[in-house]
Image (cartoon, helix red, strand yellow):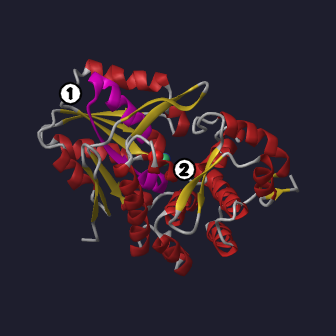
Amino acid sequence: MSEVTTIRVETADEYDVVIGREVLLDQLREALTEVDKVLVVHQPSLSTVADELKREIEVSGTQLFLAEIPDAEDAKRIEVAQFLWQIMGQADFTRTDVVVGLGGGAATDLAGFVAATWLRGVSVVQVPTTVLGMVDAAVGGKTGINTELGKNLVGAFHQPSLVIADLALTDTLDRKEILTGFAEVVKCGFIADERILELLESDLEATTNPGAPQFHEAVSRAIRVKAEIVAGDTREHGRREFLNYGHTLGHAIEHAERYQWRHGAAISIGMVFAAELGRLAGRLDDATVARHRRILSSLNLPLQYPANRWKTLRATMQRDKKTRGSMLRFIVLDGVGRPRVLEGPDQTMLFTAYQSLADEQE
Ligand code: GLY
């Protein structure tokens, strides 16, 4: 059997993240022993996996309801949550029944939200199937849906009872999906764990290959970074904000691109921006800024954005929910593994940082 790593997330209700290959069925079977009913919320591409879970787990007497939801952000709508509540209501789901979120970040965000709200909270087991979902969305208990006014405006902090990161489920992802998911892994490297950066620098192919031990190590390390930060600051009053490295500009780019860009592509540019800001603030050295560009471009992630979009991006950042008061806040680095908040940088500094990544061609 290949390696299995278990990371304990020490929030008020502690839980494990189990990382390995082909661990899903055994882990889920164990987690659902004695559970009466389970709602498996899954994206269309995972219907074969969901069918198999139903077949295998119903043998032991647990009843599985499968709910297929739309792909990506289309799932995070109140109508889809309503559809899931309807299934739970008709099947008489009680407080001891369980929701399983099977899929990418949108599926686990939605499943977590439905679990948080049904009868004021039932257990959710998260089964992320993308790199992004494994290292970010499924761990830490942020759940939610979007409204017409913005992303994640309605939600709850609701920690899962277990996260199963079955790396075999990433074997069939397209390469671009894996590489963009790695933007969040790189983020964890810069804010807390340099070994992640070294893995990518020494063997990018192996580190991004789901079957390789380096992939297991990089993903596990990124999960550990997230688990440790979340355990110390579940509701984002302090250190959890460090996880937003690259996200202030990244979210503004996602908004400008009407959420058609992959999250990792937007935060790649956001991290270059944050690194440049750190340099301009006299905190980060040139070599670490260059290291951002080198690693992100080796993953084929974008480093530039059109020069003429600055005003729009600045206005969106100003409105972003992560702005506290009227001050813009950025996470910058004093060095690898040394994140800090930079509050209210002046307009010249922001503009100068943007100039260093602005693409004049578009
Ligand atoms: N994705 C950032 C966080 O979970 O806090």
The structure residue drawn at horizontal position 37% and vertical position 42%, both measured from the top left corner, is 141
Q: Which residue is mark 1?
A: 95
Asked if ligand 1 lies within 8 A of label 2, the reply is yes
Position in image of residue 307 (x %, y %): 84, 51
Q: Amino acid at mark 2?
A: Asn
Name the residue at the right extreme. Answer: 361
59 vs 357, nearest the viewer: 357
Mark on residue 244?
A: 2
> How crowded is the residue under tag 2: few (<14 C-alpha within 10 Å), some, or many (20+)?
many
224 lies left or right of 181: left
Residue 278 lies in quadrant:
bottom right
- Place residue 258 in its image quadrant: top right
Tell me if residue 238 comes above or below residue 84 in the rendering: below
- Magenta residues span 108-136
Q: Tell me the number on the disc at residue 83.
A: none
| Structural distance between the alpha carbons of marks 2 and 1 | 33 Å
- Residue sitting at 32 percent across and 41 percent down? 159
The reply to whether callout 2 and callout 1 are in contact (CB within 8 Å) is no
x 34%, y 50%: residue: 231
